[in-house]
């Protein structure tokens, strides 16, 4: 099961299995938007907060971030508002 706010594993699998030649323009666009959204969500969510299944799913889809800090935490730290100054 994917984490809240992330694309479900079944949606990812069905989009990957169906050949591009059989997809409509709307499906192509939807797949692209969902993929970008999920990639952004993967980057924003620290690995320490991901479930085991989400980590595995991100790894399989090459969507894993290799840091433990979210982009929001990095930004807070950069301006001195985070936990790590």
Image: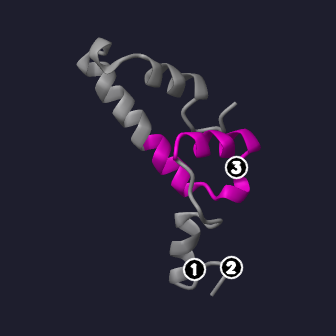
Q: Counting residues from the N terminus, which is met first, the one under dot 1 or under dot 3?
A: 3
Would you say residue 44 sits in the magenta stretch? yes
Mark 3 Cα shell of 10 Å, populated few (<14), some (14-19), many (≥20): some
Q: Is residue 77 left or right of residue 20?
A: right
For the magenta stretch, what is the residue range?
37-62
Q: Position of residue 1 (x, y in %)?
A: 70, 30
To which residue does mark 1 refer? 77
> Closer to the camera, 13 or 85?
13
Q: In the displayed structure, would residue 6 be above or below residue 69?
A: above
What's the distance in space between the residues labelled 1 and 3, CA to CA?
Answer: 21 Å
Bin the neighbour count of mark 2 within 10 Å (Cα to Cα): few under 14, some 14-19, many 20 and up: few
The residue labelled by disc 3 is 50
- Label 1 crowding class (10 Å Cα cut-off): few <14, some 14-19, many 20+? some
Estimate the x, y position of residue 62 in percent, counting from the top left.
52, 46
* Magenta highlight: main SS: helix
Q: Is residue 67 left or right of residue 36?
A: right
The mark closer to the camera, 2 or 3, is: 3
Q: CA distance from mark 2 to mark 1?
A: 7 Å
Discs 2, 1 touching: Cβ within 8 Å: yes
Q: Which residue is mark 2?
A: 83
Residue 76 belongs to the span the image colors magenta: no
Tell me the element at label 2: loop
Residue extending farthest to the left is: 25
Locate residue 3: give its quadrant: top right
């Amino acid at each position: 099961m994917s984490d809240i706010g992330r694309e479900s594993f079944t949606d990812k699998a069905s989009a990957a299995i169906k050949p591009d030649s059989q997809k409509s323009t709307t499906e192509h666009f939807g797949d692209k938007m969902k993929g970008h959204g999920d990639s952004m969500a993967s980057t924003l969510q620290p690995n320490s907060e991901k479930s085991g299944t989400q980590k595995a799913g991100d790894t399989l889809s090459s969507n894993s971030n290799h840091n433990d800090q979210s982009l929001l935490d990095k930004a807070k730290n950069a301006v001195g508002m985070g936990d790590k100054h």
